[in-house]
Amino acid sequence: MGTSRRAQPSVPRLLIFLLGTFLFFSTFSIAGTHIALAVTVSCWIILSLAGKAPRLKGTKLDHAVFIFLAAHIVAVIFSKQKLESFINMKNLLLLCIIYLIALLVQEWKVSRKLFGVLFLSCTASSIYGIAVFLLHQGEGTLGRTPGSFSTAMTFGGVLLILCSLFFSIGVGYGLTRKSRLIILSGVIIAAVALFFTFTRGSWLGMLASVLIIVAIQRRKWVLPSVAVLVVLTVILPTPYRNRITSIWDPHYRTNVQRLELLTGGWRIFRDHPVVGVGLMDLADVYERYKPPSAVFIHGHMHNIFLQYAVTMGIVGLVAFCYLVFSFFRLMMDNLRIDLPPPERAWVVGTIGALTGFLVNGLFEWNFGDAEVVTLLYVVVGSNLAIATNRNGFIWGRKSIRSEPVTTGSSEVNLCVPCSER
């Protein structure tokens, strides 16, 4: 799958408009996102059959995606709840997003417009999320804001990915001062909204993402960044500070539940190690395997790796890990491409976003959250677009400010391609 630019028709403007609509909805409306996605895919199928849109070719992700799909089919075949397991495969349809992005984003002018749409939508969604918190319309005693989504955890997972992307560009090289100020202002708004979700897993994911991004792009900022986070934690009001310190409190109620899930999940996996119990709600199964002290019954494991081990066994867990490895490999390969600084910053941001997503996934079944996975696939698809078309995803090779950077004893102009330095 993917694209080949040789002998391929150009991308119709209608498809670009529909893709932009899909990205616009992706930050705040799952219904709008899925409708826009379905319309975009349908229009692409019709136009490609008529020879008026580019068609899919092979890519370096195909092998991993095929194995991932095959592992799900195996899980369905061996499940005792075959119909339910088959229905629960529906989120696999979202994998088409990866190839849709790579297929339609072939020119830097297009990608720049799409980036703008995603940025504006993210900022507006974040402002709405902050308003929900300030108007005391959130969840629980802390007023956790779910934004326009059903839960604060979903909103936190979405903002984690978006913050990673825009933060990386904002602290990267090659931007005008005006562009940097605009992007960083949006990052601050999104980060405030992320904080008000009070989703600890998303906080930890964002922390991991920031450290990865800073370590790659601004290595000298690592220690100051940690110091700033420590100071902010100390000066926070007590209820908010307690939420942070509860992360490492083994006696905190939700931490206790996750430890119980780990115990019960291991027991399920031990009895169904190869293909798991199937892609079904795990409440009944967990009730039989949970520790005696466990009171709450959960329908999933609140951990992506444990969830795959329980529902799909070793087969599914290995397939998932290989898929994630393929995503990281694609991103790391893109760092070796001769890209302008803003595009390189985007790739670094996607590495941070995927890292943060996995850290968050240690505490939440976020791979089963369609809203979050949609944006994750956008992130991967943008990397496939870069790898396929070998050009920038945002600004391309124009409109980039020269920004010399001192590295050791030499000065490097980061706006000049590596081949011309």
Image: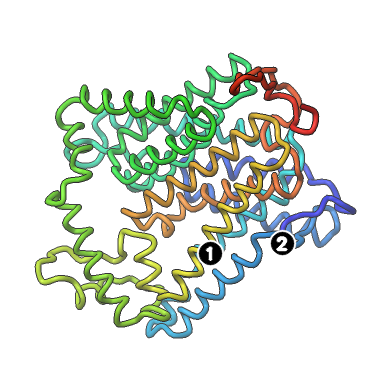
Please indicate whether residue 162 sits to the left or right of residue 393 in the image. left
Residue drawn at (25%, 65%) of the image: 262
Q: Nearer the viewer, mark 2 or mark 1?
A: 1
Residue drawn 84% across the image and 59% down it: 50
100 relative position to 321: left or right: right
Q: In the rendered view of the protein, which quadrant contains the N terminus?
A: bottom right
Between residue 95 and residue 224, name the one nearer to us: 224
Quarter of the image that includes the C terminus: top right
Q: In the drawing, what numbered circle is on residue 1?
A: 2
Q: Determine whether the residue tagged by mark 1 lies in a helix, strand or loop.
A: helix
> What residue would you read off at disc 1?
322
Task: Compare residues 227 and 22 and report the one nearer the observer.
Answer: 227
Closer to us: 248 or 65: 248
Amino acid at circle 2: Met
User: Which residue lies at the image location 20% right of the left edge and 36% below the top edge?
Assistant: 142
Image height check: is 5 above or below 135?
Answer: below
Task: Give the residue at the far front of this rendering.
Answer: 409
- Disc 1 residue type? Tyr
Occupied quadrant, residue 96 = bottom right
Residue 173: image location, x then y, percent: 60, 24
The percent coordinates of residue 68 (x first, y second) are: 54, 69
Judged from the image, the secondary structure of the residue bearing numbered disc 2 is: loop
